[in-house]
Image: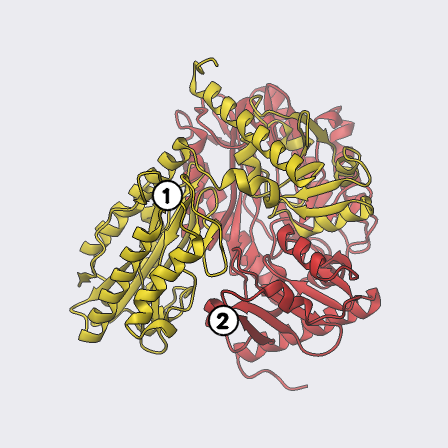
Chain colours: A yellow, B red
Amino acid sequence: MTVPATAAAAASATRTGRIERVQACMAEAGVDALLLSVGPDLPYLVGYEAMPLERLTMLVLPRSGAARLVVPRLEAMRVDAAVPAEVVAWDETDDPVALVASMVAPDAVLAIGDRTWARFVVDLQGALPSASWRRGSEVIGPVRIVKDDTEIAALETAANAVDDIAVAMRGVAFAGRSEIDVHRELAERIAAAGHQRLNFAIVAAGPNAASPHHEPGSTVIRDGDLVLCDFGGTMHGYCSDITRMYSVGEPTAEVAESYAVLRAAQETGVRAAVVGATCESVDRATRSVIEAAGLGAHFVHRTGHGIGAEEHEDPYIVAGDLRPLVPGHAFSIEPGIYVSGRYGMRLEDIVVATADGPRRLNAAPRDLAIVA
Amino acid sequence: MTVPATAAAAASATRTGRIERVQACMAEAGVDALLLSVGPDLPYLVGYEAMPLERLTMLVLPRSGAARLVVPRLEAMRVDAAVPAEVVAWDETDDPVALVASMVAPDAVLAIGDRTWARFVVDLQGALPSASWRRGSEVIGPVRIVKDDTEIAALETAANAVDDIAVAMRGVAFAGRSEIDVHRELAERIAAAGHQRLNFAIVAAGPNAASPHHEPGSTVIRDGDLVLCDFGGTMHGYCSDITRMYSVGEPTAEVAESYAVLRAAQETGVRAAVVGATCESVDRATRSVIEAAGLGAHFVHRTGHGIGAEEHEDPYIVAGDLRPLVPGHAFSIEPGIYVSGRYGMRLEDIVVATADGPRRLNAAPRDLAIVA
């Protein structure tokens, strides 16, 4: 084995290794070719991101042999020479679906990238009526789910960035501002911290926080409100995601007690996330703390989701998922307590399963921040 | 006919009208149900936007009768009461694909929204092996392609916003800055002008502009460079998109001559975009000006694309498209001249076909701006 001389060589070796592992999964699953278009799979595998537009970009990776990348001619110049695929450019009046179809056997078993637009699936199925179709994640998911050291470092860099924001928000005045105003501040801070993309910045005040995916709006934050901030973005291809709670003034005794339960549940969930534990068991451990406090009916969602190139990806920390955690799994632990019409709260960190036990990537204080 | 008393009532009437027209298209095309998930079709039809995440949101619209909206329970609270569909919430351990499949006949003809993620297409096809599948745009496209007065007003508001930016950039210094720095300025201006989303902000200097979809990078803009700026965003659901050219100092005689050809081609294209003309004929008229100047080989893409809720949508102004323009079609006219290794240029306005002739929505000066 030679040691890569440069970062570019290391990236190239990484891509080659990933392609080989995906092809091994294809052989095992009986998949003849993998077709990737928009979404994170393509940059993960070859370092090129398809534009989310109507002109088809599609990688055709056979079970063995070299990949081809079908791209519109006017984007072919964007494809770096380091991309490990033969570039096949198509012209404005060509039919890219026919081009892709010509690269596989008529009765092939095809796995198609999970986020590929349905219009291309329908068109490809029309061109290949005898082919059979699987989710791309069947063969690329098992590779993506285990993060290597470089990926964990990237997740940690992104986590540190949102930690800093979560801490800074403890010194910010909330009262009298609208949710959308605080949302904009978070969005600006996320960009300023070096993320290339904002994924979400939920700001939910008072009763609004009882809706876990509340859309920040014109609601004005008032004295006494409990405010949920759940935010993250994508930095150099890897995502951040954190939730912290802010109380405008001292919380009521009920909120303080619920928060203590939430914090204990989150701590229990993190500690349960050891190598070998099933995803379901981590959900159960987290949930049992909230149930024991008589609040189980108010924890209305799963405990967490995987994170990496996507903000939500495998593994999901949810009942029914019996997969055991392995070193390199990265995921959120984010229990919540939602009391309709009154308040809501959630506490979220990103955690990596390691041979030495669960490792939190987020380090911002987890107590209920008292703000003005 | 009653006159709607409020904006909400007007919006409701608009949605009802759209649903009726889509259902008429479904009857004509023999489609039993339309399934819509992520992307612009769903907000266009019912005023709700699906979160682009792994939890399935799907509208099931039968050919006749009322629509149902399948949503994750933790997002059900986001659905406004004005959404004209029965909300069917699913819990974290439910199977939303089975739920959708149960709402249609096993052998149904189904049209699925163009941007629906492939993973859901594959899963639905597994649950409904006897169903047949079409593109959603087959039945919603004919409705979306004709913009009403409210939509044209929204496109004009967005066009005015980027016009102002294009004008402001004429007073900005380019030399010595990187493309990505100018890109960031455009992105900030697009947000500040009231767009909720940046769609793209291409900045391509000197030879980089010969790549039509160049990714702005670290290239430093130098004296004498010709700089292409193509930018737009989404404002209240409708898109802006404009391209203007900036020359750092006086252009060479060759660039000035090519630009004169480009401007004449764009003007000819706009004038050709009359009701009844085919999309292909507008492309031909535009292209012929560039061909007559001996530069035809350097115009490597179609003349334009439709615009509305999506930055690129039907109708496409391209050879082979024999559809005639009708009042309410909105599209770009954007010829380009790309000389590999040396320079590139493009000039783009959004145009609406009307009974009174083509109407430009952009009004920013079209001459080659000389900047510092």
Q: Nearer the viewer, residue A352 or B272?
A: A352
Query: Where in the figure is residue A46, as x and y percent of width and height?
Result: 56, 30
**Residue assigned mark 2:** B76
**Residue A56 visible in this rendered orientation of the protein:** yes
Q: State how many labels appear.
A: 2
Q: Is A256 located above or below residue B65 in the figure?
A: above
Mark 2 and mark 1: Cα distance apart in space: 33 Å
Q: Is B257 located above or below residue B52 in the figure?
A: above
- Quadrant in the rendering for residue B141: bottom right
Q: Are tags 2 and 1 found on a single chain?
A: no
Q: Is B24 located above or below residue B306 in the figure?
A: below
Query: Where in the figure is residue A173, as x and y percent of width and height?
Result: 20, 60
Name the residue type under label 1: Ala
Query: Where in the figure is residue A90, as x and y percent of width and height?
Result: 73, 32
* Number of other residues with Cα within 10 Å of mark 1, as a class: few under 14, some 14 to 19, many 20 or more: many
**Residue assigned mark 1:** A353
Name the residue type under label 2: Ala
Q: Position of A128 compared to A259: left or right?
A: right
